[in-house]
Image (spheres, grey):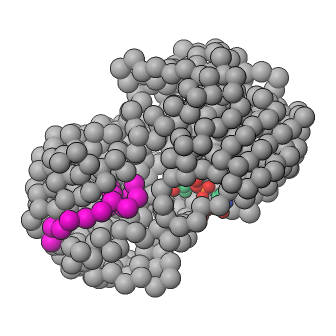
Amino acid sequence: MNKLIISGQNKLYGKVEVMSAKNALLPLIASCVLLDFEVGFLNCPKLGDVVVMLDIIKSLGGKYRYDGDTLYVDCSSLYIPELPCELSKKIRASIFLLGPLIARFRRVSAVTPGGCNFGERPIDIHLDSLRQLGVEISGKENLYLRAEKLIGSRIRLPFPSVGVTENLIMASCLADGETVITNCAKEPEIVCLCNFLNKLGAKIVGAGTSKICVEGVKKLTKNFAYYKPITDRVEVGTYLLATLNTGGEVEINGANFLHNVSLIKKIYNNTCKLTFESDKIYLKCCGVGSSLGFIKTGPYPAFPTDLQSPILAYACSLSGKTIIEETVFKNRFSIIPELKKMNADITLQGSKAIVNGKGKLNGAILNANDLRSGAGLIISALGAEGVSEIIGLDIIERGYFDIDKKLRMLGANVTKG
Ligand code: UD1
């Protein structure tokens, strides 16, 4: 049962619910390493990557449990500062544990992380910035980190990396003195992490801007029962693009439109009506759109790289030319050969994809080579003529919970096979 079989061209109608974001949950779970008590996170899907992260916590001596959609994580009994090799290789986010583990144990052994395969994903900025907090690091594939103590520092990132910003925030929370991180990432998931830590007594200001100051504290303390992470803006974007590609009318519950402004600006035109409430987006399609013009991915608030494959898939079914430039992960185009099997007209020139929209694509047998290219293929298959099979459902389920059920509820013809 590792594929999705989609018979295309059913319009999507109805309501769909989005839950806590994978990219918010992964650093939140990592930050539990800083705590010697249990915390509960609301509205949590059992996503593939989240379960791997939780299993890593378990292998370090921590505990977790689900009660319905509430996830409880308890790191009070954590005692092993050694990241397990096999599990760490499964997810890039295992690197997020370095910061909190070094803050708690002053020594960590780890292996370089794995994750989605879209070219080289170095960890140099992670390691360099931890060094600036006083961490000594040796080894290449197997890493050994030691610090007598963590000392607050001024750190300017060469690129506003999401993971590095999160790692540094977690490490510096319990450091001696103040850490100032400039040119840091401004993603909503960073704000979500900082709000959580501040509720526990951390002193972090500036989250959501390019300068974050963290005043180290001695200890974080429990003073609330549950925390509700932000919902998944990439999942929201995926359902918006899927609906635009098929036609129809959907209500996305749990969606914060402020987190998806760059996407909304691109799709907002006279072929659809979009309305927003504080936690809902309504989309009604009323025609076939034309070219999306030029799209350039970049750090938030620019267009997210995680929606690049989904919007590329949508652009193929429009009339006219769309150019998409990828600036975050330059080789993140594994969807292109798959879309070509569906008769899409795309030319790759360096880090730019030039899409000549052709209207309807044809169903085909496709491979989900990474999580977001898998999501893009679903979007294409839903709008295509005929049947498509998308192999690699396990890759898609790393980041999309019950995607087949949710699409069926909207009227799509989707089965697992
Ligand atoms: C996070 C998201 C991922 C998203 C990405 C960019 C999570 C779990 N994942 O990944 O879905 O696509 O942000 O929005 O939140 N880089 C280096 N050296 C480093 C670290 C990063 O060169 O030490 C480079 C990367 O190769 C990439 C760029 O910086 O080219 C951005 O990566 P980064 O923001 O760190 O992405 P992640 O945190 O891994």
Q: In the rendered image of this protein, does residue 345 appear above or below residue 67? A: below
396 sits left or right of 198 in the view: left
The residue under the point 21% across, 78% down is: 343
Question: Is residue 409 in view?
Answer: yes
Question: Is residue 284 in view?
Answer: no
Q: In the rendered image of this protein, does residue 109 appear above or below residue 344? A: above
User: Residue 105 versus residue 272: which sits nearer the camera?
Assistant: 105
Q: Quadrant of residue 388?
A: bottom left
How far across and how far down the image is residue 117, in percent? 48, 61
How far across and how far down the image is residue 373, in percent? 37, 61
How far across and how far down the image is residue 257, in percent? 41, 47
How far across and how far down the image is residue 59, in percent? 58, 28
Q: Is residue 264 magenta?
A: no
User: Residue 385 versus residue 260: which sits nearer the camera?
Assistant: 385
The residue under the point 50% across, 71% down is: 331
Ligand 1 quadrant assignment: bottom right
Q: In the rendered image of this protein, does residue 15 appear above or below residue 113? A: above
The N terminus is located in which quarter? Answer: top left
262 sits left or right of 319 in the view: right
Magenta highlight range: 362-376
The residue under the point 41% across, 40% down is: 48
Q: Quadrant of residue 192?
A: top right
Q: Is residue 370 magenta?
A: yes
